[in-house]
């Protein structure tokens, strides 16, 4: 028997069923309040995360030393760090071949900064997205091998058998996290928690975290020789940025890395991140939201539509003047990227809608769609349909595409299999995101086969995702103090969604459109308490028109509490996500 919908909302304004805490969860939350004296809303969040009362303190104050895995638990780690140190001590030429996204750029910056602290440097090489595509290629690796003794492939390389073989004149070390095949490339070391022969316990790490663990092992080996290595904790701002931007789950050690990294970032000691935050007009302490939606897209902009190495150079530079110039250029490229994305998004949505949103895979392909924005558009399709989505740009005889998945559906493994079956020219990635290259003539059969594999994993089984709520609040209880308490359970993001609360039978006192698509609402209860809410993109769907024309009706409101900082003042507001007539 299906549990009763929360507040009896079976179909909300956005077509979702509301799911609240179970009776058992409510009892556990009440017991936690009695034992810990925490606010009930926070207790409900902790219970939903599976935290027991005895573990509350450890969860709210996670210590990296307790959660950081032993680097040597990863295969090839000792050999990778030893070869890295041998190159440093021998003053050998080193090249870093990195992916063009935030994770790749942060991974490269970690190594460049570490080497600089040790009085050495490395050559940075990031391939052009359009001319070279993802990962090592034969000409680039051959050229690097001519002039360098060691090549570090970061956030790439696990599937690059031929390019790494072509670099035989140099030693190659791979530091990656993408899904591996049954055979590994001919590298000196392949450190990857998603190798086929790994347990998968650390498969949630992004590449920057793998690089960070390699530097932890390098420092350990230096200490054994009586040498002090660089301060690794000061590098956690880069690890945090990569973890959030690469949509890694914010659980376990990832959560601790991001929490500590945000503290490091708040000290404003990294010239590149300071310049980027300033040009983006960030006027509050950084949070996971800023990493994912403010800083990350700007770092990514160079790899998407500009010079591929701009983001890594920004993150690695120690020169504030260079940082300011790079940040300004990336900000301009990000504006250009948004314009390109909007055009592709509209066309992709129309095509996918015509094909049908009910399939296990939502996909679209278009002539000349920029490869730098297809991943973002795929994410938009995924969000709109609650289905895995793939968007492909066609040029000549090939299409290059990117996909995004939903929770519980491993898109990377499915794409890897379709490539192994010969329907894709190339393909791979991880559970939530993947890339592919397909021959134009095989586009339809490749997408049909991918949809078939995803359907076996349960993709497309339902409609819009249920809205899961952490409980009920009154407007008067939504205080800055409560938001600060709840934030202790963060940071929130992939794998650790921000808590959502409902406000029952609220009277709307004001509803006004902001710009073309957004809505600002003020609502309250019989006590006179009021709360402001903002719903971004509300007029792109039914939520905006419903609340704007409320006609004095009462509504259940649902969303996430946040602190709105504006012109030096701070107040609580609701990030409104859904509503239903009371």
Image (cartoon, rainbow, N blue to C red):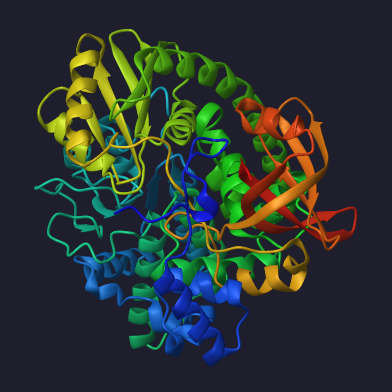
Query: For the point 32% across and 45% down, which residue is it?
Result: 156
Query: For the point 23% across and 55% down, which residue is it?
Result: 194
Q: Position of residue 62 (x, y in %)?
A: 49, 79
Residue 49 visible somewhere in the drawing: no
Question: Going by the image, does 301 lie left or right of 134?
Answer: right
Name the quadrant containing residue 517.
top right
Disc tally is: 0
* Viewer-closest of 36 and 4: 4
* Viewer-closest of 511 and 207: 511
Query: For the point 33% across and 7% down, which residue is it?
Result: 396
Quarter placement of the N terminus: bottom left
Q: Say if 470 sits above or below 548 in the image.
A: below
Residue 220 visible somewhere in the drawing: yes
Q: Position of residue 401 (x, y in %)?
A: 35, 25
* Viewer-closest of 203 and 559: 559
Name the quadrant containing residue 437.
top left
Query: For the point 36% across and 73% down, which residue is it?
Result: 218
Q: Say if 407 sits above or below 398 in the image.
A: below
Name the quadrant containing residue 287.
bottom right
Q: Position of residue 110 (x, y in %)?
A: 48, 60
Q: Position of residue 178 (x, y in %)?
A: 28, 48
* Viewer-closest of 368 and 52: 52
Q: Say if 466 sits above or below 443 in the image.
A: below
Question: Going by the image, does 520 lie left or right of 560?
Answer: right
């Amino acid at each position: 028997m299906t549990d009763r919908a929360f507040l009896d909302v079976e179909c909300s304004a956005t077509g979702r069923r509301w799911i609240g805490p179970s009776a058992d969860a409510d009892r556990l939350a009440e017991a936690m309040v009695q034992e810990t004296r925490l606010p009930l809303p926070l207790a409900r969040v902790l219970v939903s995360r599976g935290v027991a009362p005895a573990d509350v303190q450890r969860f709210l104050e996670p210590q990296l030393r307790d959660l950081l895995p032993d680097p040597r638990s990863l295969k090839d780690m000792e050999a990778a760090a030893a070869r890295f140190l041998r190159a440093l001590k021998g003053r050998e030429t080193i090249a870093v071949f990195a992916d063009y996204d935030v994770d790749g750029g942060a991974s490269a910056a970690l190594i460049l900064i570490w080497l600089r602290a040790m009085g050495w440097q490395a050559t940075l090489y990031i391939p052009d997205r359009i001319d070279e595509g993802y990962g090592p290629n034969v000409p680039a690796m051959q050229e690097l091998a001519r002039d360098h003794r060691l090549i570090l492939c970061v956030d790439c390389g696990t599937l690059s058998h031929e390019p790494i073989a072509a670099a035989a004149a140099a030693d190659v070390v791979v530091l990656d996290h993408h899904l591996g095949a049954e055979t590994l490339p001919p590298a000196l070391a392949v450190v990857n928690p998603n190798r086929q022969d790994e347990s998968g316990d650390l498969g949630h790490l992004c590449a920057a975290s793998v690089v960070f663990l390699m530097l932890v092992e390098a420092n350990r080996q230096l200490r054994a020789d009586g040498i002090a290595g660089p301060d690794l904790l000061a590098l956690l701002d880069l690890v945090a940025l990569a973890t959030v931007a690469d949509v890694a789950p914010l659980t376990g050690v990832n959560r601790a890395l991001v929490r500590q990294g945000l503290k490091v970032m708040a000290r404003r000691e990294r010239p590149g991140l300071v310049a980027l935050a300033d040009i983006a007009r960030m006027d509050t302490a950084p949070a996971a939201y800023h990493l994912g939606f403010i800083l990350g897209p700007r770092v990514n902009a160079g790899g998407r539509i500009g010079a591929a190495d701009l983001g890594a150079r920004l993150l690695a530079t120690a020169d504030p003047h260079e940082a300011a110039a790079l940040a300004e250029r990336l900000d301009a490229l990000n504006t250009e990227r948004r314009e390109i994305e909007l055009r592709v998004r509209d066309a992709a949505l129309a095509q996918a809608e015509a094909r049908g949103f009910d399939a296990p895979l939502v996909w679209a392909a278009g002539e000349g769609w920029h490869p730098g924005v297809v991943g973002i558009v795929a994410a938009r399709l995924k969000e709109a349909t609650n289905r895995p989505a793939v968007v492909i740009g066609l040029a000549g005889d090939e299409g290059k595409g990117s996909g995004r998945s939903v929770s519980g559906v491993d898109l990377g493994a499915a794409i890897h299999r379709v490539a192994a079956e010969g329907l894709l020219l190339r393909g791979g990635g991880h559970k939530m995101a993947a890339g592919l290259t397909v021959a134009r003539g095989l586009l339809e059969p490749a997408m049909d086969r991918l949809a078939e594999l995803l359907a076996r994993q349960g993709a497309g089984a339902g409609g819009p995702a249920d809205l899961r709520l952490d409980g009920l609040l009154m407007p008067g209880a939504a205080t800055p103090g409560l938001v600060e308490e709840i934030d202790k359970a963060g940071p929130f993001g992939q794998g650790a969604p921000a808590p959502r609360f409902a406000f029952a039978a609220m009277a709307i006192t004001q509803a006004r459109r902001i710009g073309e698509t957004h809505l600002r609402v003020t609502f309250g209860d019989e006590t006179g308490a009021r709360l402001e809410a903002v719903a971004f993109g509300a007029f792109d769907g039914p939520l905006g028109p419903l609340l704007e024309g409320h006609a004095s009706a009462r509504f259940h409101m649902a969303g996430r509490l946040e602190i709105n900082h504006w012109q030096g003042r701070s107040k609580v507001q609701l990030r409104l996500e859904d509503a239903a007539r009371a």
